Image (cartoon, grey):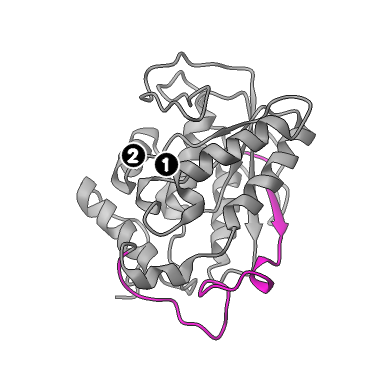
């Protein structure tokens, strides 16, 4: 069994996820986004996955496990109010028997947002609402990808994955295709060998990701989405609204509990 790093909870009795041949394979070049079934499955490769503990990155983790020999998740404490999402990331890694790395980055001290500021309330509504811009944490993904890239170089991994998707484009600048392309260029130059940035869900909806996750057997009861970060999900913030909409669209029951 692979060791777990991070939050100490004692030995975990888990089975590693069966790595059966699957359909998921990322594009070789970030600017080309083939359908998931177009590239043959590859093995004996290392990858780093940025794992927030939410639906998208958790589904991505399961997906990457189907075609990579060694997978190394990494999570970040950055001063977010919903810091419990990192515990969810750890719980998923423990279930899957994966090593877990978490880093403390005081991003909220220099890049204020409603997600990090105690003096600003989390806006309610849908992601497409103008008020959702208050939830932007400036430059967050560039920081996360940079640390994940350094981790990958240290491990000798060739690829870094993160779970940006089509529903993020309207609000979050660091989830848009232009940002992905620019970061991909930087990562090809930042080390002696090329590090690839893989964002296979970039044009998928949340419902698309959920459909994929149900096929993969993702345990969504271990994921956390709500920006409030309290005992129960609020069901009203942008993150909750998008999650609930996806479960309704796909026609499956959300296994987490909500306040209302």
User: Does residue 243 appear anywhere in the picture?
Assistant: yes
Q: Residue 56, relative to residue 245: is it above or below?
A: above
State the residue lying farthest toward the bottom.
119
Residue at 54 percent across and 72 percent down: it is 113
Check disc 2 and report the residue beneath it: 214
Q: Main secondary structure of the magenta part?
A: loop
**Which secondary structure, mark 2?**
helix
What's the distance in space between the residues labelled 1 and 2, CA to CA? 6 Å
Q: Quadrant of residue 218?
A: top left
Label 2 near label 1: C-beta < 8 Å?
A: yes
Front-lying residue, 66 or 173:
173
Q: Judge whether residue 8 can be spotted in this image.
A: no
The residue shown at (48%, 24%) is 27
Which residue is most to the top?
40
Q: Position of residue 246 (x, y in %)?
A: 28, 52
Q: Residue at (31%, 68%) from the top-left corner?
A: 129
Rendered residue at 59%/58% (across/down):
139
Tell me the element at label 1. loop
Q: Is residue 48 above or below residue 254?
A: above
Q: Which residues are magenta?
A: 98-126
User: Which quadrant: the N terminus?
Assistant: top right
Asked whether, in this view, residue 242 is left or right of residue 106, the answer is left
| Foreground residue among 2 and 110 | 110
Residue 52 image offset from top left, x and y in percent: 55, 53
**Badge 2: few (under 14), some or many (20 or more) residues near its Cα, within 10 Å?**
some
For the C terminus, the image quarter is: bottom left
Residue 87, quarter of the rendered image: bottom right
Q: Is residue 234 left or right of residue 146?
A: left
Tell me the residue that label 1 is attached to.
218
User: Which one is in front, 253 or 67?
Assistant: 67
């Amino acid at each position: 069994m692979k060791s777990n790093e991070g939050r100490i909870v004692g030995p975990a009795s888990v089975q590693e996820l069966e790595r059966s041949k699957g359909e998921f394979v990322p594009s070789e070049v970030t600017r080309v986004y083939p359908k998931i079934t177009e590239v043959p499955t590859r093995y004996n490769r290392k990858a780093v996955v940025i794992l927030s503990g939410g639906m998208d990155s958790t589904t991505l983790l399961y997906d990457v496990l189907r075609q990579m020999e060694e997978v190394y998740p990494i999570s970040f404490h950055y001063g977010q109010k919903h810091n419990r999402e990192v515990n969810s990331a750890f719980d998923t890694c423990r279930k899957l028997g994966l090593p877990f790395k978490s880093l403390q980055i005081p991003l909220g001290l220099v890049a204020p947002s409603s997600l990090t500021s105690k003096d600003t309330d989390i806006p309610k509504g849908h992601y497409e609402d103008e008020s959702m811009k208050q939830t932007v944490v400036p430059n967050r993904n560039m920081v996360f990808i940079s640390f994940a890239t350094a981790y990958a170089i240290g491990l000798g991994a060739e690829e870094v994955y993160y779970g940006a998707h089509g529903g993020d484009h309207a609000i979050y600048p660091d989830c848009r295709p232009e940002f992905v392309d620019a970061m991909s260029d930087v990562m090809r130059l930042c080390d002696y060998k090329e590090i690839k940035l893989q964002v296979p869900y970039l044009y998928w909806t949340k419902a698309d990701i959920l459909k994929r996750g149900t096929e993969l057997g993702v345990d969504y009861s271990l994921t956390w989405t709500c920006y409030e970060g309290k005992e129960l999900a609020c069901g009203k913030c942008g993150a909750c609204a998008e999650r609930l909409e996806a479960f309704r669209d796909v026609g499956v029951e959300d296994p987490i509990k909500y306040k209302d």
